[in-house]
Image (spheres, grey):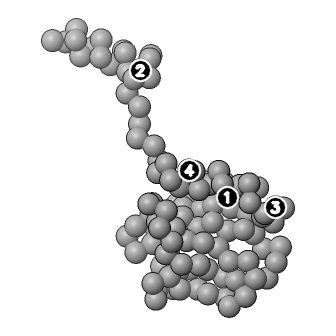
């Protein structure tokens, strides 16, 4: 029994058969790849992950080279929750102030 467990551990370690679950969904990864190819600001575009209303959300920010660009907010299934910023200066998602209630997790991509 110990030998079997040891072999399994060694196999997982050396051959990578025990893989960690992906950190982001396939649709978010695909959306990031499409986003990177779209017209964006030269240096300030990004995709950031937040915890908002007890769920992971992703903010696709085109950058700040123009005053009317808005950042799209998507959930893990790529459903749109709304936009932030833009010419209207939108700050709320589902009636909740995003900046006051979102917890930054990490930056997934930036240019």
| CA–CA distance in space, label 2 to label 1 | 35 Å
Label 3 belongs to which residue?
A: 43
Numbered label attached to residue 76? none
Marks 3 and 4, how far apart in space? 20 Å
The spot of residue 30 in percent (x, y) is 57, 51
Q: Check whether the beta carbons of the residues at disc 4 and disc 2 lie within 8 A of each other.
A: no
Which one is in front in this view, the residue at disc 2 or the one at disc 3? 3
Crowd rating for badge 3 (residues with CA inside 10 Å; few <14, some 14–19, many 20+): few
- Judge depth for marks 2 and 1 and give the one in front: 1
The earlier-in-sequence mark between 3 and 1 is 1
Label located before the other in sequence (2 or 1): 2
Q: Earlier in the sequence, mark 4 or mark 2?
A: 2
Looking at marks 3 and 4 on the same chain, the residue that comes earlier in the sequence is marked by: 4
Contact between labelled residues 3 and 2, with CB atoms less than 8 Å apart: no
How far apart, in angstroms, are the residues tagged by discs 3 and 1?
14 Å
Query: Residue 107 location, x and y as percent?
Result: 61, 57
**Residue sitting at 74 percent across and 54 percent down?**
37
Label placed on residue 29: 4
Structural distance between the alpha carbons of marks 4 and 2: 26 Å
Which residue is disc 2 drawn over? Answer: 13
């Amino acid at each position: 029994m110990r030998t079997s467990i040891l072999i399994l551990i060694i196999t997982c370690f050396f051959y990578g058969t025990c893989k960690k679950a992906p950190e982001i969904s396939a649709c978010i990864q695909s959306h990031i790849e499409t986003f990177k190819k779209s017209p964006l600001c030269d240096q300030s575009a990004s995709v950031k992950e937040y915890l908002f209303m007890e769920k992971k959300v992703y903010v696709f920010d085109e950058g700040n080279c123009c005053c009317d660009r808005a950042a799209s907010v998507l959930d893990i299934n790529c459903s749109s929750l709304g936009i932030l910023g833009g010419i209207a200066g939108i700050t709320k998602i589902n009636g909740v102030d995003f900046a006051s209630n979102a917890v930054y997790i990490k930056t997934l991509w930036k240019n």
